[in-house]
Each structure stands twice: as C-alpha cells, then as structure tokens.
Image: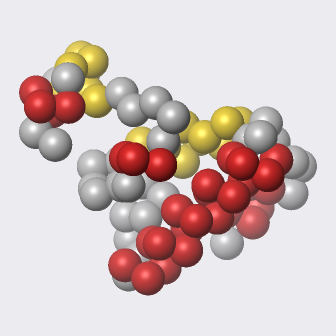
C-alpha cells in the first residue's frame, strides 16, 4: 500500500527504507520487480536502504555503509 501511495504524484525519486523487510519472500520479489519496472519504464530514481538480502546485481550503483562510513562490499560483510 505504501508503494501505491508513493506513486500517486508520479515522483522522480523514491526513497525506499527496507522495502522488503517485513514481507514474505514471494512478496519481496514482487516489490523488487515493481521497483525495477518503475525505474526502467518511468525513469524513477530509486534509493533503497536495506540490511537484508537485496538483489544487488540489478542496481546501477550500490553503496555499502558500516558504522556511518562508506566502505567496500567486503568491509560491509556482503
């Protein structure tokens, strides 16, 4: 429902804080697919913040942080 509300005004930027954090794996895949489609079809910029297993390979750019600092993927433990 939050995704639907976020899209009403056709934003150019979506900030997604743990978009798959509290859902089952199948719903999580649907959410990721929806975000990817928004990015590709409508050129919506996505900023996704997550502690979980997000499919990093679909992103154009991934920034890892640890203790408030930007680090390498390895330093972040992924």
| Residue 40 image position (x, y, % from top left) | 72, 48
Place of residue 52 in the rendered image (x, y in percent of width and height, measured from the top left): 28, 56
Q: Which color mode does the image show? A: secondary structure
- Camera-side residue of 71 and 11: 71
Is 53 placed above or below 25 here? Answer: above
Q: Is residue 59 left or right of residue 77?
A: right
Q: Residue at x 12, y 31 (%)?
A: 74
For the N terminus, the image quarter is bottom right
Viewed as shown, does residue 65 lie left or right of 6?
Answer: left
Q: Is residue 17 visible?
A: no
Q: Which residue is drawn at 44% across and 82% down?
A: 26
**Which residue extends farthest top?**
69
Residue drawn at (48%, 42%) of the image: 59
**How many labels, in total?**
0
| Name of the residue lying farthest toward the front | 57
Relative height, residue 61 to residue 54 (above, below): above
Residue 65 figure quarter: top left
Q: Is residue 30 visible?
A: yes
Where residue 62 appears, as percent x and y from the top left, is 39, 32
Please say if 13 is above or below 39. Answer: above
Residue 61 is left or right of residue 63, and the answer is right
Pick the quarter of the image with the C terminus: top left
Looking at the picture, tell me which residue is in the foreground, 16 or 45.
Answer: 45
Above or below residue 37? Residue 66 is above
Judged left or right of residue 77, residue 49 is: right
Specify the quadrant of the image occupied by residue 36. Answer: bottom right
Q: x, y (%) of residue 44?
A: 74, 41
Image point (39%, 47%), residue name: 57
């Amino acid at each position: 429902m939050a995704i639907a509300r976020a899209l009403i005004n056709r934003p150019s930027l979506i900030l997604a804080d743990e978009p798959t954090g509290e859902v089952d794996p199948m719903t999580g895949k649907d959410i990721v697919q929806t975000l990817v489609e928004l990015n590709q079809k409508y050129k919506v910029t996505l900023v996704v913040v997550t502690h979980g297993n997000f499919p990093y390979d679909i992103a154009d750019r991934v920034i890892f942080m640890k203790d408030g600092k930007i680090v390498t993927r390895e330093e972040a433990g992924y």
